[in-house]
Amino acid sequence: MCGIVGAVGFVSPKDYVFNGLKMLDYRGYDSAGVAYFNNGIQIFKDVGSVEHLLSIVPETIDTNIMIGHTRWATHGAPTKLNTHPHLSFHEKICLVHNGVIENFKELRGFLTGKGYRFYGETDTEIIANLLEYYYLEKGEIIEAIKTIMTLVKGSYAFAFFTSEDKNTLYVIKKASPLVIGLGEGFNLIASDASPMIEHTNKFIELDDLEFGIVTKDKVAIYNKKGEQIKKDTISKDVELISHDLKGYPHYMIKEIEEIPQTVRRLMAKYYQDDKYQFDPNLIKDLEESDHIIFIACGTSYHAGLVGGRYFEKYDKSTSRFIASEWAFHPTYPGKKPFIIMISQSGETADLIHCLKIIKEHNLKNLIITNTGGSTLDRNAMYSLLLYSGIEVSVASTKAYVAQVTLLAMLAAALSNDTKLIDDLTDSLDVIYDIQDHYKPLIMKVADEIKDKKNLFYLGRSFDYFLSLEASLKLKEISYIHSEAIPGGELKHGPIALIEKGIPVIVFITDPDTAASMRGNIEEVKSRGAKVYTIATKSLSKPEDTIMVEDYAYYLSSVAVSSIAFYLAYYVALAKGLNVDKPRNLAKSVTVE
């Protein structure tokens, strides 16, 4: 869960690398570092932000080559010694790494027996030394690369250069993203295309167990046997990977307010000429399956909960699983199961683990992701893209709504239920109304709850699924302990936690459960809770906090999720927290 950038032959490597690190620091921001060649290998690194790193690097750097890295700590605390880049023991290899090496203890023991010493705690330092050991033993860097690819277990994207060649970058990839950008008289590397899009729109995406040799004029790609292979050049949509804040103070609020265009883009992409535009083979396989299994993590799992209910509406039996649980205890209900995986990044390590199991059992499968060319996009049987544009803020907002929207459209396509399109259009009106009129009220609620230590969300049915996501958002960026509880479960234990002054936020948008939810409100009020209610107009009462126009209640996670997102945003803002980069979290979870 780190960001890698690099350049060779670039007219100003420092500018590119630091701008790239700033773009990628949502992937990891405990520490940052750069390395370049100028009378030997020069390394600058420290704990803290990219801006801090820039302040300790020489203003002018004369070099032909540079690599940079932002780190989110996995092996070893965020310290200067553990910060990338890492220099090998004999100072031959300078390397950065994204991923996790599973057999690092075994490799460390091997190298210790060969006289190597280690200064930090990272698995990355071990790889720098392992490369050096085999480079010195075999005398050829390609032979060293081939050897370590047979020895190293885990996930990795490596980028490095040697002390003996100031004109060449080397990259190696397995289960962690790495992209090469092609220029005229220069070539670039990065964890994704966004840092490079200003300079090129031609890219090569490495597949697993491939490595590359990158100079200013040439890129050569090899398989694990060392055989050179041909790779297609791809282009990227500039608009969808733009990091432009467009006048917003933070990415999170920008992305919340991009929800309507995200929904519209999905409708335009997957519904044309009064027909759903999905692969007919995908629809056929879904129709013929007798059980649909949803597998995801975090926010995507919450989208899967909603999506499962959508498919049940069309008489499909479903199960929903957290990927990190299913991976170790996989189950396959039904005789012809179909598996839907959901991942914003397409690089989620837990899901990659699941996909390996799915393919071993020859199960039909689909990935829903925002990232074309990602590991899951390339390796799943079917893939549907969210077309949400890049989501920089660690807390997912527009991608969550896109996932729910796409799942609703996919389920409706099974019965060619076109009423969904009208319902989505009505939901867009609600979203615009929230954006235009309700933010001051949400800010007022945020100010009232910002100093609370605990909070509860309540809902039933689709409102409960939305409550789960609302609660997660609040936890992620405000650090308030929050729980989402189905209204009917209050009396089965959680009501013991209700005390005077505790905030309870309630969604009431479902006509079938509205009366029961009103009863739940009275239960927590009688025990001293401060209740905030979000209700639709036809179900509202004068004392409700927020009343929105009616919409098809099954689209709660589309229509009113922005209320929950705004609330989390404004609470974090009121507490003076880093909205886009909450502590301990990273955007793309590429480790299990």
Image (tube, rainbow, N blue to C red):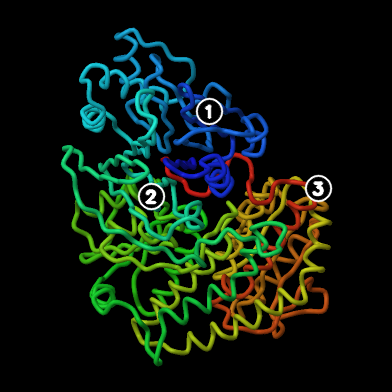
Viewer-side residue, 567 vs 266 = 266
Q: Amino acid at mark 2?
A: Val
Q: Quadrant of the C terminus?
A: top left
Q: Amino acid at mark 3?
A: Asp
Q: How far across and how far down the image is residue 449, in percent?
A: 79, 54
| Residue 308 in sight | yes
Which secondary structure, mark 2?
strand
Residue at x 28% of width, y 49% of height:
207
Q: Residue at x 27, y 56 (%)?
A: 379
- For disc 3, the marked residue is 451
CA separation in Å, label 1 and label 3: 34 Å
Q: CA distance from mark 3 to mark 2?
A: 43 Å
Say which residue label 1 marks.
83
Q: Helix, strand or loop at disc 1?
A: loop
User: Which marked residue is nearer to the observer: mark 3 or mark 2?
Assistant: 2
Does residue 369 appear left or right of residue 221 in this picture? Answer: right
> Along the polypeptide, which appears first: circle 1 or circle 3?
1
Q: Which mark is residue 179?
A: 2
Q: Quadrant of residue 439?
A: bottom right
What is the number of the mark on residue 548?
none
Q: For mark 1, does the 10 Å Cα neighbourhood hold few (<14), some (14 to 19), or many (20 or more) residues? A: many
Closer to the chain start, of discs 2 and 1, is 1
Residue placed at 33% from the left, 52% from the top? 205
Q: Is residue 333 above or below residue 541?
A: above
Residue 103 percent coordinates (x, y): 32, 26
262 on left or right of 439? left
The amino acid at mark 1 is: Thr
